[in-house]
Amino acid sequence: MPPTPRPSSNGELPRGAVTRDVERHRDGGAVARVRDAIAEEIPIAFVYNERPHAVMMATPVDLDDFALGFSLSEGIVERSAQCLAVEAVEALAGIELRIAIPPEKAAVLEDRVRQLTGRTGCGLCGAQTLEAAVRHPPAVSGAPQVRATALQRALGEMPAKQLVSAATGAAHAAAWADLDGRIVWLREDVGRHNALDKLIGAMQRAGADPRAGFLLVTSRASYELVMKAATVGIGFLAAISAPTALAIALAQEAGVTLVAFARADGYGVYAHGKRLLAERTASPGDAPGRPDRERTA
């Protein structure tokens, strides 16, 4: 059952949520027309040096974090300082994020786009092969060891900080916890990869050390989440739902510890498990519990 929508502690909806009319039908034929909390979702266009690059469907909050995190996690820039300026401009159909980057980075980005023009095939970014579609970031170095008790603490803290999800039931979250399991930053979005980009941006703007904590996401552990984490040097990722086979393969290759089905009663470890310091030795018959379904897609 989805969470009951609720406002924030001051009686107002959190940023990223709006209200809309809904006609609720209940058992027995009762019908009520009420105002419901709904997650915002609009097109966000990324424009680099006045050249359009990509459009994401996203929740229009934390846009400076989004611009920086996307630029870093997609390998468009290598350092925060290379995002020279970010301007969010409202347009008729959504928002443009106008991002200034060094000319040499813009030239590499333009070449990347040109190489995709005119291709047909799998439909993923115009790529024809798996090798062309999947980026392989360098292996993460200096990834931390994480105690299982810290992971459980972070899992316990996370729901109270998910204000958009609590209000609407329709947002993913990505959170960064320190090695004691305290949530330091959390970002939400209707898209799981957008939430992670926003978190990466917030961490980079704060000068966070990716070796001094671990990443939690409220979705499945898909390939792009592992890729984005590894690209910015995050070496420990825990997801509350299932991993994909490609995510596991990339985590093994990139040196990322991948934990999935992370719940209060257990978890599954799919790559580089020696970094997770468990309190007990698992027996051969142990297996992570599987949820009935993911809370959001």
Image (cartoon, helix red, strand yellow):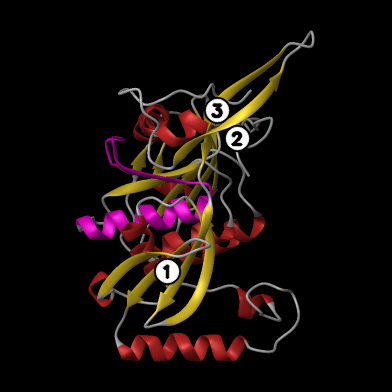
In this orientation, does residue 176 appear?
no
Q: Earlier in the sequence, mark 2 or mark 1?
A: 1
Q: Which mark is residue 36?
A: 3
Residue type at mark 2?
Answer: Arg
Magenta-drawn segment: 178-206
Q: Earlier in the sequence, mark 2 or mark 3?
A: 3
Give the residue pinned by disc 2: 295
Question: Where's the N terminus, which quadrant?
Answer: top right
Numbered disc in front, either 1 or 3: 3
Residue 136 part of the magenta-drawn span: no
Percent position of residue 32, x then y: 66, 16
Marks 2 and 3 close (CB-CB < 8 Å): no
SS of the residue at dot 2?
A: loop
SS of the residue at dot 3?
A: strand
Percent position of residue 77, x then y: 35, 76
Residues packed near mark 1 inside 10 Å, few (<14), some (14 to 19) or many (20 plus): some
Marks 1 and 3 close (CB-CB < 8 Å): no
Q: Nearer the viewer, residue 273 or 240?
A: 240
Q: Nearer the viewer, residue 36 or 204?
A: 36
Residue type at mark 1?
Answer: Ala
Residues packed near mark 2 inside 10 Å, few (<14), some (14 to 19) or many (20 plus): some
